[in-house]
Image: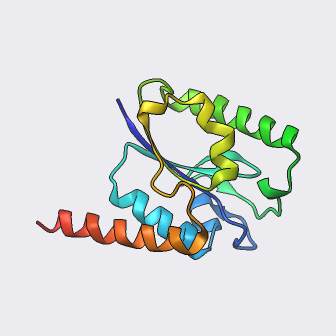
Amino acid sequence: MKTIVLISCSSEKESTATTAEQLYTSSLFKKSLACAKKLNPDAIYILSDKYYLLKLEDKVEYYDISIKDMSSQEKKAWGEEVIAKLKQVADLKNDKFIILAGENYLKQILPHISSENIELPLKGQKRGVRLRTLNEEINRLERESNK
């Protein structure tokens, strides 16, 4: 069983082509990524509104597409594509997933992953609360690693 962390992209981005890890510049993305790395998972992937599922090192270009602006049919298609890509790198029934993403992403992918293997530490939280939760989790993980 692998542990996989999924984090959502952000609307704040670098304007030039770069790696997925460096493209997104929002404080929420950076905190999510820092938290994901502290968890020492087997893999970290970014849920991208344009590219669906990205490895941190994938080369990407700036885009201006948001899942918030998609129709319900487009969101459904987006979710199906994310799940198809996840199936290539993970076992949806047995791997553990820690998902650091908002409701627009969760609604599209949760029905396809075994619910007993999912952790949703940010579920239902607004942006400011998510940042605080991530800070607390990063601090907790740092304290544990220093013991």
Farthest-out residue, front? 124
Quadrant (top left, top right, bottom left, bottom right) of the N terminus: top left
Percent position of residue 29, x then y: 56, 67
When the figure is inspected, residue 10 is found, relative to residue 120, above or below; the finding is: below
Q: Give the residue drawn at x 63%, y 38%.
A: 109
Residue 2 or 111: which is nearer the viewer? Answer: 111
Q: Give the residue drawn at x 64%, y 59%.
A: 9
Quadrant of the image occupied by residue 25: bottom right
Farthest-out residue, left? 147
Q: Give the residue drawn at x 75%, y 73%.
A: 15
Percent position of residue 64, x then y: 83, 63
Residue 20 or 134: which is nearer the viewer? Answer: 134
Residue 6 or 13: which is nearer the viewer? Answer: 6
Quadrant (top left, top right, bottom left, bottom right) of the C terminus: bottom left
When the figure is inspected, residue 125 is found, relative to residue 96, above or below; the finding is: below
When the figure is inspected, residue 81 is found, relative to residue 43, above or below; the finding is: above
When the figure is inspected, residue 53 is found, relative to residue 15, above or below; the finding is: above
Percent position of residue 72, x then y: 85, 42
Quadrant of the image occupied by residue 94: top left
97 with respect to 83 (left or right): left
84 with respect to 45 (left or right): right
Q: What colour scheme governs how the chains and residues are painted in the rendered image of this protein?
A: rainbow
Q: Give the residue drawn at x 72%, y 48%.
A: 51
Count of labels in the image:
0
